Image (cartoon, rainbow, N blue to C red):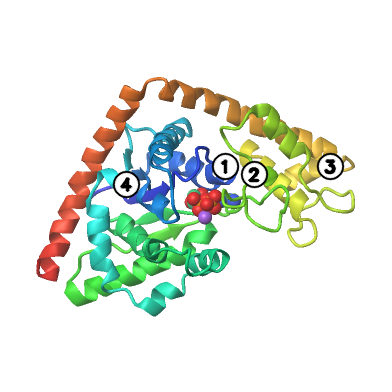
Amino acid sequence: SRRPRVLSGMQPTNASLHLGNYLGALRQWATMQDEYDAFYCVVDLHAITAGHDPAQLRERTRVTAAQYIAGGVDPERSTLFVQSHVPEHPQLAWVLSCITGFGEASRMTQFKDKAARQGTEATTVGLFTYPVLQAADILLYDADMVPVGEDQRQHIELTRDIGGRFNSRFGETFVLPKAFIPEATAKIQDLQDPTVKMSKSIGGAGLIEMLEEPKVIEKRIKSAVTDSGREITVDPESKPGVTNLITILSALTMRPVGQIVQDFEGRGYGDLKKEVASAVLDTVIPFQKRVRELLDDPAQLDALLATGAEKAHDVASATLRKVYDRVGF
Ligand code: ADP
Ligand code: NA
């Protein structure tokens, strides 16, 4: 029997991943490689839903792949690939879009939020159908588990709904995936507005970018918004800033939150920030070094990605053949 399979991916919409991507996604990917047959992709098809620059996209796709490896994804043990290198993704997405309800897709909160921010005229059809492409990404590989952040839960549910619908209409074809949401690091918040999650779409001084100058990162942590009062305790409601810093420290050092609270009894926010900054830099500095090494040898990186695409294509093409046959193509 095969090892259970995981699949996950991130968009190359920025050059740098941020700490939320690293703690909420990438680090879990690395730890899952032994137990699971892992597929990790750079989802560049998803990155063009809102306008983009081609040369920049090409560059960011490679930098993102390099960050996967720097974050611990091992291209020998896992299948590391770029989504657009495997043509079955949009091919399956079309079939799935024809069994997805317009109303069903309209209920996706991430779409509703983004569309509301941009306005209907600036919102593309690609952004609307993006969760269907995401379902194809997952279903192509018979993924059992999809490690994602809380914000993706609804998309994984949609994937299960669409996959299950296909199975009951056309015959058992797809494995229905489960979302895997690691509890402790599920959500890293923005440093400037700790009531919202750290996100590239918000950007600014609230973001810790993995490829940012260490000095800048340090400064951002030191000027993170804390809360009134002086006590270092975990309370997401009344102390979101301090809670976020403790969450980050705990995730990076593997120290339980309760222990951190105890260690900081009677100490101030300045001390906490200093320790958070040092823990972040301990992770970020070697990460940046590894990314630079990988980017210094573009031929080697491209070869790794070509091998990954071949491995992914073997699996994806077998699934698509089955789907086309069942649909009547
Ligand atoms: P962003 O929100 O910056 O656009 P993405 O939506 O591209 O990031 O997310 C890529 C991965 O990182 C997903 O698995 C997502 O759940 C995770 N992720 C994104 N932001 C955070 C965060 N602030 N805390 C934890 N995980 C996050
Ligand atoms: Na997002």
Q: From the top left corner, tell me how far across and down residue 318 is, in percent.
A: 15, 53
Disc 4 residue type (three-letter): Gln
Q: From the top left corner, tell me how far across and down residue 313 is, in percent.
A: 21, 45
Residue sitting nearer the eye, 34 or 25: 25
Left or right, residue 13 beside residue 83:
right
Q: How far apart are marks 3 and 2 (CA)?
A: 19 Å
Left or right, residue 11 beside residue 190:
left
Does label 1 point to a residue whose CB lies under 8 Å from ligand 1?
yes
Which residue lies at the image location 41% right of the left edge and 66% below the top edge?
128
Does label 3 point to a residue whose CB lies under 8 Å from ligand 1?
no
Q: How far apart are marks 1 and 3 (CA)?
A: 23 Å
Q: Which of marks 1 and 3 is nearer the N terminus?
A: 1
Disc 3 residue type (three-letter): Tyr
Residue 128 showing in the rendered view: yes
Q: Local crowd at mark 1 within 10 Å, few (<14), some, or many (≥20)?
A: many
Q: How far apart are marks 4 and 2 (CA)?
A: 26 Å
Query: Which element is circle 3 on?
Result: helix
The dot on residue 207 is 2
Q: Residue under circle 4?
A: 83
Q: Residue under circle 1?
A: 18
The dot on residue 245 is none
Q: Residue under circle 3?
A: 269
Disc 1 residue type (three-letter): His
Q: How far apart are marks 1 and 2 (CA)?
A: 7 Å
Q: Local crowd at mark 3 within 10 Å, few (<14), some, or many (≥20)?
A: some
Q: Local crowd at mark 4 within 10 Å, few (<14), some, or many (≥20)?
A: many
**Which part of the image, by quadrant, shows the C terminus?**
bottom left
Q: Distance between the residues labelled 3 and 4?
A: 43 Å
